[in-house]
Amino acid sequence: MLNKRISLITLGMLSATQAMANDQAESKGFVEDSSLKVLLRNAYINRDYKDGRPDKAEWGQAAIGTFSSGFTQGTVGVGVDAFGLYALRLDGGKGRTGAQGIDFFKQENDGSANHDIAKGGAAVKFRFSNTVLTYGDQMPALPVLSYDNVRLLPESYTGTLITSREIKGLELNAGRFTAESRKSDEGRDSGGLKSINVLGGSYQFTERFKGALYASDVEDVLKKQYVNANYVIPFNKDQSLTLDFNGYRTKLDNSYVRENGVTGDDNKIWSLAATFATGPHSFTVAHQRSTGDSNLGYAYGGYQKDQGRVGDGGNTIYLANSYWSDFNAEDERSWQLGYGLDFSAFGVPGLSYNFAYVRGDNITTSTSEGGTEREIFNQFKYVVQSGPAKDLSVKLRSSILRVSQKSSEYNVSGNEVRVFVDYPINIF
């Protein structure tokens, strides 16, 4: 059914009324619009667990090169995108690697980790008017299929994606991917994905209001729907209130439930965040709630090959209360108080700080009900504004997570520290 829907929406994209300037008509050429960028990333994550299990830490240096050509001139433009990834392990050998949430370097059967990772990918793209069809290796960023780029190396997927912006304010997406490349391993199909179909779009209804609807179907695993509504209320030049609603509904396939020993197959999860911004300050209040009969709660990400997970991208959780913990257990309710500060108002442009306190309760596991968890999140980030190191960013992040004994089947207490140094270089 979803394949049929993708075909129908593709036809709709190509026949949509052109209410915008024709991007392809303004093409400068394959070479003239091309770019080559390299991101140098040094990343470290340390997890100090509080339940007696061994602490985990990984540290690595990566180089992420991306090439994007322009489109040839003519009615249908042709182009190429490509990437090359390399990572070198600096720490996190036998005994310290293997934490599912870190996953810089895949752990082998003997407990050791890969010393380095090298891989690449390429895709061909075609553009007609403001519609682009891309086939090959890609890094999609959609609410139902969002690649993970918050570790050492990014994930990627192999398949076809159509993106159309024929009508002003409207973006439509339809695609099918048949392979997933794990961020910590080499090869195009190291994630074990059979296939995933995606369909949906977003629309800017007014200057202040935007909405989105998406759906996906991961073969033999689950079907997922997503909805978003975002509304901004400006008060004056320096003050505004943003209301952001996000919701997912997932339905696990019967075969997946049987083969993985899962209880229940349905989950609904949503979050509503209100952020008041005034000058350099922002204050956030958010509530998130998970319901349904699946003991997995909201299921996303991971790798089907050796983790028994979903395989739809490690960032496919567009919800308010997602930090170290995602607060996505069965029946869980969570509340957040957050604060942000932009130091540019105090003479330090490029420096920002974010804080969040999140508390979850009503957690259900196979052995208990009414479990709780709480997290204190802090992050400083600095981006160099000028000079030879312009755009270099340093991010220091910490989380203190405490989980009640009743919830130990779902999550684990610990202290986490992350240090990321990113240096983007524009070759051309």
Image (cartoon, grey):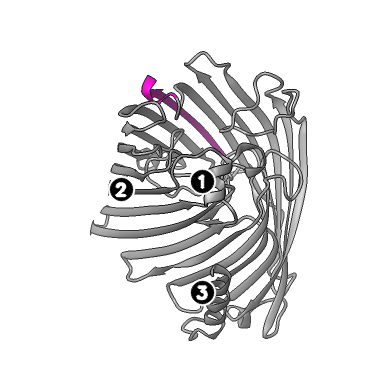
SS of the residue under disc 3: loop
The picture quadrant where one finds residue 196 is bottom right
Q: Residue, x 47% and y 22% (percent of image)?
A: 415
47 left or right of 209? right
Q: Which mark is residue 273?
A: 2
Q: What crowding class fits label 3: few (fewer than 14 Cα within 10 Å), some (14-19), or many (20 or more)?
A: many
- Whether residue 134 is visible, yes or no, is yes
Query: What span is colored magenta in the figure?
Result: 393-408
Of callouts 1 and 3, which one flags the residue occurring earlier in the amino acid sequence? 3
Q: Main secondary structure of the magenta part?
A: strand
Identify the image quadrant of the C terminus: bottom right
Please tell me which residue lies in front, 211 or 66: 211
Residue 209, compared with residue 400, is above or below; it is below
Please tell me which residue lies in front, 358 or 382: 358
- Whether residue 404 is visible, yes or no, is no
User: Looking at numbered disc 1 in the image, what kind of residue is underneath it?
Assistant: Tyr
194 left or right of 313? right
- Residue corresponding to mark 1: 300
- Residue corresponding to mark 3: 165
Residue 395 belongs to the span the image colors magenta: yes
Of callouts 2 and 3, which one flags the residue occurring earlier in the amino acid sequence? 3
Point out residue 400 in the picture as x, y percentages from the top left corner.
Answer: 42, 24
